[in-house]
């Protein structure tokens, strides 16, 4: 389909709460998902949310097999997740570096819950119900934040660990967003 432009931090739509999907398995939903897939792949993203391409609907996708932006990350299955619900398991939180296609060229340390139970639907209306941890849980939380109008810099607790990639990691080959 189409590689779409990704909205950047400052765009008002990125701060809105996205609307729930009410019609599954429609040509419009499939076209949106194809555009999201093409855009995520073109930018080597680990995930993308519909609001990032200007569509305020509760649709995210994520997946990591081999990704130059996350060379040491564990694999995360390719998933389309619609109308998600997240429930955190336990109180354990872990700080780690995150980037975002909507905040290009920057990274920050973000606290996220380590274990997560998430539910939702795929594009056909089939139920998705998973217990996950680690990087998988982090990616899901990051992408679902977009559906609530939250960008990762809003979650940073120590701004000394937020900045431009080339300044934070001089001489390292860390991919830009």
Image: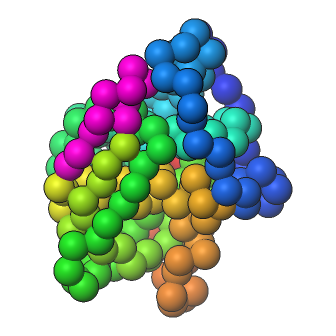
- Give the magenta part as a residue range: 121-130
Question: Which of these two is toward me, 72 or 157?
Answer: 157
Above or below residue 28? Residue 158 is below
Q: Quadrant of the N terminus?
A: top right
Q: Is residue 136 magenta?
A: no
Relative image position of residue 174 (x, y in whole percent): 42, 53
Relative image position of residue 21 (x, y in whole percent): 57, 35
- 97 vs 58, left or right, is left
Above or below residue 8? Residue 10 is below
Determine the residue positioned at 43% across, 76% down.
Answer: 109
Q: Residue 113 falls in which quadrant of the image?
A: bottom left
- 129 vs 37, left or right, is left
Determine the residue positioned at 28% across, 79% down.
Answer: 94
- 120 vs 177, left or right, is left
Q: Residue furthest front?
A: 22
Q: Residue 67 falls in which quadrant of the image?
A: top left
Q: Is residue 76 visible?
A: yes
Above or below residue 65? Residue 153 is below
Determine the residue positioned at 49% across, 72% down.
Answer: 108
Q: Is residue 129 magenta?
A: yes
Above or below residue 91? Residue 80 is above
Q: Is residue 175 visible?
A: no
Relative image position of residue 20 (x, y in whole percent): 58, 42
């Amino acid at each position: 389909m189409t590689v779409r432009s990704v909205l950047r931090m400052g765009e008002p739509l990125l701060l809105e709460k996205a609307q729930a999907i009410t019609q599954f398995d429609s040509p419009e939903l499939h076209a949106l998902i194809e555009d999201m897939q093409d855009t995520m792949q073109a930018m080597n993203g680990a995930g993308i949310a519909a609001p990032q391409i200007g569509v305020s609907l509760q649709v995210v996708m994520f997946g990591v097999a081999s990704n130059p932006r996350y060379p040491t990350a564990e694999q995360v299955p390719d998933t389309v997740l619609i109308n998600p619900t997240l429930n955190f398991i336990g109180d354990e939180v872990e700080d780690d570096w995150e980037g975002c296609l909507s905040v290009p060229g920057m990274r920050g340390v973000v606290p996220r819950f380590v274990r997560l139970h998430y539910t939702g639907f795929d594009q056909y209306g089939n139920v998705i119900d998973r217990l996950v941890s680690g990087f998988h849980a982090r990616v899901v939380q990051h992408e679902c934040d977009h559906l609530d109008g939250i960008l990762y810099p809003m979650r940073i607790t120590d701004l000394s660990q937020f900045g431009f990639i080339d300044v934070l990691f001089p001489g390292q080959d860390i991919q830009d967003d």
